[in-house]
Image: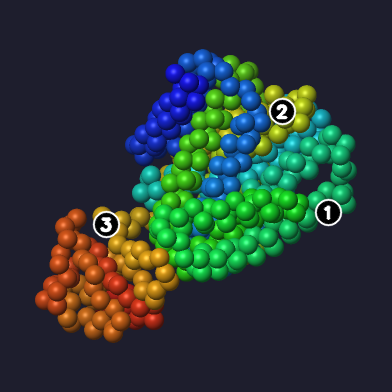
Amino acid sequence: MFFIDKLILAAGALMGLGTLSSKLSSRFGVPVLVLFLGIGMAVGADGLGIEFDDHEIAHAVGTVALGAILFDGGLATSMGSFRLVWKPAGLLATVGVLITSLITGAAASWILDLPLLEGMLLGSIVGSTDAAAVFSVLRNAGLRVRERVAAMLEVESGSNDPMAIFLTVGLLEVLRGDTTLGPDLLVLFLQQMGVGAVVGIAAGRASVVGINRVHLGAAGLYPVFVGACGATTYGLAALLGGSGFLAVYLAGIVIGNDRIVFRRGTLLFFDGIAWGGQIAMFVVLGLLCTPSDVIPVAGQGLLVALVLIFVARPIIVVPIMALFRFTLRESLLTSWVGLKGAVPIILATFPLMFGLESGGTLFNVVFFVVLVSAIVQGTLTPWFARKLDLGLPSPPAPPVTLDVQSLFDVDADIVEYVIPPNAFVAGKHVRELGIPDGAVVAMIVRNKEFIPPRGSTVLAEGDFVFFLLRRDCRAALDGLFARTTEDEA
């Protein structure tokens, strides 16, 4: 058996275990990233005995996976959400991460008896939040939060990684003597963010034109082409001295909010890629961790985590959100769900690669802080949302999906509506609805059963109604299905 055969077997088994472990997350309310990390630790040096200590490979896997996750997050971020909260989210993603890092770093310096700059380095490493972890927890609990809060969590956590990466790399360069605190670091910040933003937006727009104009012979090539656009965007931004992560996230937003060929297939493709990236990344990072090295710093790590959760993040989140007229309850929830994910653990490999003497200690403390954040904050987030009266029941999910799969841009959409209680259309025959020209009922699903749509079909509460329509008919149908019996009284 060749080495590559063994590697494929091991990788397949670990990916399979990681995928199946997601079922435990929904059953027991444990964030899925904890389970992925646990699998890596279970087969590592203190478990089944697989030795893995190559920080450069771990960093490479983490970078590729994180780029894919951010690109997928951008594709799934609606421009409406972005416009709704871009100002407060942008402040939290920059100033918020900076202040959080400074406070946590000062505390870490005292708790771990480290030089102040090395403490600040640790604070920078744990400064960002993980959007995937937040929404995974809420979905598994059957909860959603109010639109403005959900948009805030989505945009802030999707855009704050570049700031944490910049602070980490910048402080490492200061510690190595390659740059100085002050103007040099400010220039580096402006370069990273400015170049990353310009490249991301420009490349996203160019990608949309290219995707829609190139006529590929097979539908499966379109997601591959979109992925090539994302990878090129990251590499180009990095080559020009900008933040590749910021660029790829913004490019994803631009592409995802435009009409592109084979759109739904592309979104599903990258959703799978992002999940695969998460599993691979967390399992590799779990392999990199040796529990026997983490346990001795558990007490110090717990103190750092408590400062981060209960002091450093609330002290900046609450006043920034108050400036934009968020309520105190909304601010407290946003502060609480600042879960830590893969980025801090990936960044914790940087000091080791840079040869920092305290690199091992920093890595182990960061790993423990991420575990505490994921387990404590992740497990209690649904309860906290309900206590603050900010949790809303998740809308019912349709048992089927319907989509227009075309290799060319056509003026047609598939739109679905669920009929709520007291809806005006409930109890009406399809022929009585006054459906506008250019729209047709494509499918009705009731209690997981397909109902053939005819003029004599009577709609009922809880039905999922799918329309095939021209884009100019959307507003009229939205208004029709938004009407209630109270409106008619």
Dot label at residue 187:
1
As displayed, is residue 27 above or below residue 241? above
- Between discs 1 and 2, the one toward the N terminus: 1
For the point 71% across and 50% down, which residue is it? 238
User: At which x and y percent is residue 117?
Assistant: 81, 35
User: At which x and y percent is residue 196?
Assistant: 69, 56
Residue closest to the far left: 456
Residue at disc 2, secondary structure: helix
* Residue type pointed to by label 1: Val
Dot label at residue 400:
3
Residue at disc 1, secondary structure: helix
Q: How many marks?
A: 3
For the point 54% across and 36% down, which residue is it? 281
- Between discs 1 and 3, the one toward the N terminus: 1
- Between discs 2 and 3, the one toward the N terminus: 2
User: At which x and y percent is residue 344?
Assistant: 63, 38
Dot label at residue 169:
none
User: At which x and y percent is residue 31?
Assistant: 45, 38
As displayed, is residue 226 above or below residue 299? below
Residue 110 relative to residue 69: left or right = right
Give the CA distance from mark 1 to mark 2. Answer: 26 Å
Determine the image quadrant of residue 448. bottom left
User: Which residue is denoted by mark 2 in the rendering?
Assistant: 352
